[in-house]
Image (cartoon, rainbow, N blue to C red):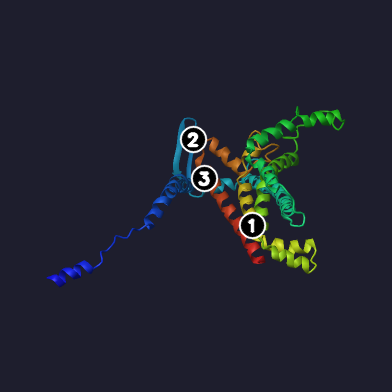
């Protein structure tokens, strides 16, 4: 009896182990619930509606009636002008994005190299970062209203041109000439986003080992040789990220041309983007056609992003 009691006393007690793994799942559960309810579910409904005839005519709702690829066929059918509006809107979107994105990337890259140069060793770089990023905080609609006020027939640009004798009468630079309006849209997008791109590129350059630059200088490499052989190759992942995110944002361009042209895409639909075309169908409650455009936009975005990523990766 005594030996049994001694053994039971010497036997260590088992402690309850606390599993913290479940708490990780509990903490991320709200994100997945919100994503499923407000993102994934609407996306699936959009894809489903794209195969249905579903619109409102007056006070009556037509559908949803399954019509297969009928909505897609209508989008690829030429209109009264002989143009496929989907192609025109997609072309307008890509052109206006390229007009702003090319200069945005070039100028942002130049500024990033300038402000991260150890030779120049510029002061107050934090202040300049804030100044560059500040336009990104202004709403796109505010920028569009500002440019409309500057360049319309009664704006200061026309008044200055007439005062200097450059024009005999006011010219509506917003809705008269296609390339003028496109340039205004591209300029607004450039002003809004070049600061964000500059900061991203600066962060990428600052992440490159400084010893590589020092070794290149010791070997007598010129600044251009250092840029093309060291900076640009090591900065390629950031450049890919900037290009893809800029392209996705460009394909979703809506607010600037919508406000600047009052939703008309003037002149002659040369500034109507694909999202503006989608909004035209939503405004008349044609959910089937709007869903088809959304699906096409998703496919185009995915294909272009893959091609950009693949082309840069092959160069590596």
- Figure check: 181 above or below 300: above
In this view, the residue in front, 143 or 129, is 129
CA gap, disc 3 and disc 1: 33 Å
Q: Mark 3: which secondary structure?
A: helix
Where on the picture, by quarter, is residue 263? Answer: top right
**Quadrant in which the N terminus is drawn:** bottom left
CA gap, disc 3 and disc 2: 15 Å
Instruction: Tell me the residue that label 2 is attached to.
Output: 56
Q: Is residue 201 left or right of residue 301?
A: right
Instruction: Check contact, mark 2 vs mark 1: CB within 8 A.
Output: no
Instruction: Tell me the residue that label 3 is attached to.
Output: 291
Mark 3 neighbour class, 10 Å CA radius: few under 14, some 14 to 19, many 20 or more = many
CA gap, disc 2 and disc 1: 46 Å
Q: Mark 1: which secondary structure?
A: helix
Mark 2 neighbour class, 10 Å CA radius: few under 14, some 14 to 19, many 20 or more = few
Q: Is residue 218 visible?
A: yes
Rendering coords of residue 166 (x, y %): 86, 33
Q: Is residue 258 visible?
A: no
Q: Residue reaching furthest left?
A: 1
**Quadrant in which the C terminus is drawn:** bottom right
Marks 3, 1: nearer the viewer: 1
Q: Which mark is residue 252?
A: none
Q: Earlier in the sequence, mark 3 or mark 1?
A: 1
Instruction: Tell me the residue that label 1 is attached to.
Output: 238
Marks 2, 1: nearer the viewer: 1
Rendering coords of residue 105 (x, y %): 70, 52
Instruction: Check contact, mark 3 vs mark 2: CB within 8 A.
Output: no
Mark 1 neighbour class, 10 Å CA radius: few under 14, some 14 to 19, many 20 or more = some
In this view, the residue in front, 63 or 89, is 89
Marks 3, 2: nearer the viewer: 3
Q: Earlier in the sequence, mark 2 or mark 1?
A: 2
- Figure check: 286 above or below 27: above
């Amino acid at each position: 009896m005594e030996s049994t009691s001694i053994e039971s006393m010497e036997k260590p007690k088992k402690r309850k182990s606390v599993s913290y793994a479940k708490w990780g799942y509990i903490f991320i559960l709200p994100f997945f619930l919100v994503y499923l309810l407000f993102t994934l579910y609407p996306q699936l409904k959009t894809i489903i509606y794209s195969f249905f005839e579903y619109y409102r005519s007056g006070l009556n709702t037509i559908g949803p009636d399954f019509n297969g690829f009928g909505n897609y066929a209508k989008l690829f059918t030429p209109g009264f002008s002989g143009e496929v509006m989907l192609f025109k809107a997609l072309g307008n979107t890509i052109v206006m994005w390229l007009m702003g994105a090319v200069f945005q990337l070039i100028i942002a890259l130049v500024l990033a190299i300038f402000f991260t140069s150890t030779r120049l060793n510029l002061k107050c770089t934090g202040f300049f970062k804030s100044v560059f990023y500040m336009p990104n905080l202004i709403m796109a609609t505010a920028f569009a209203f500002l440019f409309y006020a500057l360049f319309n027939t009664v704006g200061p640009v026309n008044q200055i041109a007439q005062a200097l004798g450059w024009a005999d009468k006011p010219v509506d630079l917003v809705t008269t000439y296609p390339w003028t309006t496109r340039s205004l849209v591209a300029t607004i997008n450039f002003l809004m986003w070049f600061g964000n791109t500059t900061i991203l590129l600066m962060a990428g350059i600052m992440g490159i080992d400084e010893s590589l630059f020092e070794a290149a200088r010791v070997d007598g490499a010129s600044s251009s040789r250092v840029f093309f052989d060291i900076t640009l190759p090591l900065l390629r992942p950031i450049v890919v990220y900037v290009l893809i995110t800029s392209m996705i944002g460009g394909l979703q361009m809506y607010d600037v041309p919508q406000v600047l042209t009052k939703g008309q895409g003037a002149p002659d639909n040369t500034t109507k983007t694909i999202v503006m075309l989608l909004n035209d169908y939503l405004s008349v409650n044609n959910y089937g056609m709007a869903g088809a455009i959304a699906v096409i936009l998703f496919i185009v975005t995915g294909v272009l992003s893959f091609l950009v990523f693949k082309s840069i990766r092959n160069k590596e």
